[in-house]
């Protein structure tokens, strides 16, 4: 492997020689002209040749790449990997081209590509289609494993010659920081500590480093990814901020500079390489979307691993997945759980839910059901110690079932009508602003089940509040109920 100090000197000399040279003009003969410039084998042309590579078709890019690989120039490794930061859309499925680029990087024997591979791996899924991207990711990861983390030892003569060249060029050897993967490993090992995050921010630098430091110094509490966000989070410079989990993330919230709240699946392939990755040790909130598109085996492999030790909020799991995960560490620590219900889930998971020691809030997504399944009646154990919430379009069918459980607090939500919450003898209504009348219709249907309700609160604008107040008075009179409507 070439010593990084030699590669740095080549970069410096080439940059001095290249100053003032124009970019290759995009003329009709640009491909011929590009090949003619490459044939000169001038190190000062390498950067503009790689820039020109990025604007060509796949066929032309392969021909140009072959012309570049005829030389052993240390500038090429980092420059070629940089193509992943903004690749041409025509290259998204160009398997042969990306494989050739990875092979070229390996042949250059440049130790500096190790950190660059770490930087671009999270971008593979963004730059390349998944069918090709999975293979490219694996090849890059394998290539990285062949690059030693430390440079070779210089002998006395080599050190003297390099020092002389550096003096002549007016430069000094760059201090080699600890490899970024070592710094990340420290962050993962101490998820609650700020120190390792600060060290990593200083090492990575740029917009990403600034973002990490800014969040570490902020006193604002982070948003909750399970709640609608009224204001977008500060812009993320690129998907590098999501680290190794960028491939799977649909959405994320950065907390203290790192992805601690995630929505997955962004893709349904390449999951195996994420199983057990230490980056999951930072994640506290995890929402699974479109879980039916991913095999239950893969999902259980991922979520059931011991690295999921900090997850406290887990959502989007169907009943069968909860049943598979109940014996795994992740559910023993989860405080808020969202479960998707389907008509086929006849067996249910009442006993499994009752056994979860840390559970404080259980949300059941019943939008696919006309009525609550029979096993809901066995949820009394869970209802006695945690809040229940149900998303459904059929509030009238679910309310009696939850009321019969004797739940300490439960919430029923409908995207069309609004939200209805019961806590002890208090009923709280939050209507959908466009259809306040729907909630009055539902409360009218529920009147036989409202015995014991002493207070009703309405969370709405003044006009809607007045409308609901009048409707509630009529309901109470007709049903013989006695409750106070709070102002």
Image (cartoon, rainbow, N blue to C red):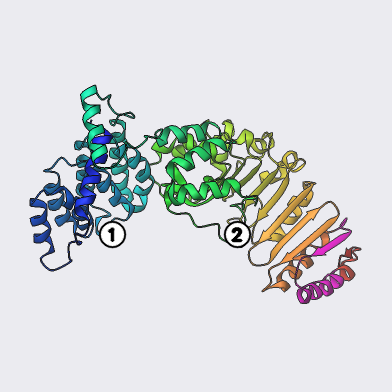
User: Are the residues at dot 2 and dot 1 in contact (C-beta closer than 8 Å)?
Assistant: no
Q: Which mark is residue 136?
A: none
Asked whether residue 261 appears in the rendered view, the answer is no
Residue depicted at x 46% and y 49%: 208
Q: Is residue 300 above or below residue 465?
A: above
Considering depth in this image, is 446 or 135 the residue closer to the camera?
135
Q: Which mark is residue 229?
A: 2
Q: Position of residue 295 (x, y in %)?
A: 43, 42
Q: Position of residue 141 (x, y in %)?
A: 32, 37
N-terminal-most mark, 2 or 1: 1
**Magenta-tinted stretch:** 451-475
Distance between the alpha carbons at the discs numbered 2 and 1: 32 Å
- The residue that mark 1 highlights is 89
Q: Quadrant of the C terminus?
A: bottom right
Residue depicted at x 46% and y 36%: 184
Res. 135 image quadrant: top left
Considering depth in this image, is 136 or 383 the residue closer to the camera?
136
The question of residue 349 being in magenta is answered with no
Q: Quadrant of the N terminus?
A: top left
């Amino acid at each position: 492997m070439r010593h990084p100090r030699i590669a740095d000197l080549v970069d410096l000399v080439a940059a001095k020689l290249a100053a003032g040279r124009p970019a290759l003009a995009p003329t009709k003969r640009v491909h011929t002209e590009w090949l003619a410039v490459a044939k000169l084998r001038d190190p000062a042309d390498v950067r503009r040749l790689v820039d020109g590579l990025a604007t060509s078709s796949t066929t032309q890019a392969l021909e140009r790449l072959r012309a570049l690989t005829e030389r052993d120039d240390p500038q090429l490794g980092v420059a070629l990997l940089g193509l992943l930061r903004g690749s041409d859309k025509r290259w998204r499925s160009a398997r042969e081209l990306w494989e050739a680029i990875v092979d070229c990087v390996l042949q250059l024997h440049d130790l500096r590509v190790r950190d660059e591979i770490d930087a671009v791996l999270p971008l593979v899924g963004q730059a390349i289609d998944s069918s090709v991207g999975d293979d490219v990711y694996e090849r890059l990861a394998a290539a990285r494993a062949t690059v030693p983390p430390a440079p070779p030892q210089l002998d006395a003569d080599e050190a003297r010659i390099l020092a002389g060249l550096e003096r002549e060029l007016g430069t000094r050897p760059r201090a080699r920081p600890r490899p970024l993967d070592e710094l990340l490993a420290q962050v993962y090992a101490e998820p609650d500590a700020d120190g390792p995050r600060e060290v990593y921010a200083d090492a990575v630098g740029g917009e990403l480093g600034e973002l990490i430091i800014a969040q570490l110094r902020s006193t604002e509490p982070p948003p909750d990814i399970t709640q609608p966000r009224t204001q977008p989070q500060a812009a993320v410079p690129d998907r590098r901020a999501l680290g190794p989990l960028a491939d799977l993330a649909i959405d994320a919230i950065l907390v203290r500079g790192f992805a601690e709240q995630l929505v997955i699946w962004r893709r349904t392939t390449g999951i195996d390489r994420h199983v057990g990755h230490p980056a999951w040790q930072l994640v506290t909130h995890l929402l699974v979307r479109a879980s039916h598109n991913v095999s239950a085996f893969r999902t259980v492999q991922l979520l059931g691993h011991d690295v999921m030790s900090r997850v406290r909020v887990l959502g989007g799991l169907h009943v069968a997945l909860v049943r598979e995960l109940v014996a795994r560490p992740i559910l023993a620590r989860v405080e808020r759980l969202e479960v998707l219900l389907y008509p086929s889930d006849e067996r249910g998971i009442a006993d499994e839910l009752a056994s979860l020691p840390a559970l404080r809030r259980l949300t059941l997504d019943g939008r696919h059901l006309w009525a609550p399944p029979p096993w809901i009646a066995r949820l009394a154990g869970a209802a006695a110690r945690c809040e229940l919430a149900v998303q459904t379009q059929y509030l009238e069918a679910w309310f009696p079932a939850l009321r019969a459980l004797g739940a300490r607090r439960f919430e029923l939500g409908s995207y069309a009508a609004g939200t209805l919450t019961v806590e002890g003898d208090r009923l709280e209504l939050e209507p959908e602003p466009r259809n306040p009348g729907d909630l009055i219709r539902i409360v009218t249907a529920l009147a036989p089940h409202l015995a014991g309700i002493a207070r009703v609160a309405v969370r709405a604008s003044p006009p809607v509040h007045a409308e609901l107040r009048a409707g509630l008075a009529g309901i109470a009179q007709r049903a013989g109920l006695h409750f106070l409507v709070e102002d």
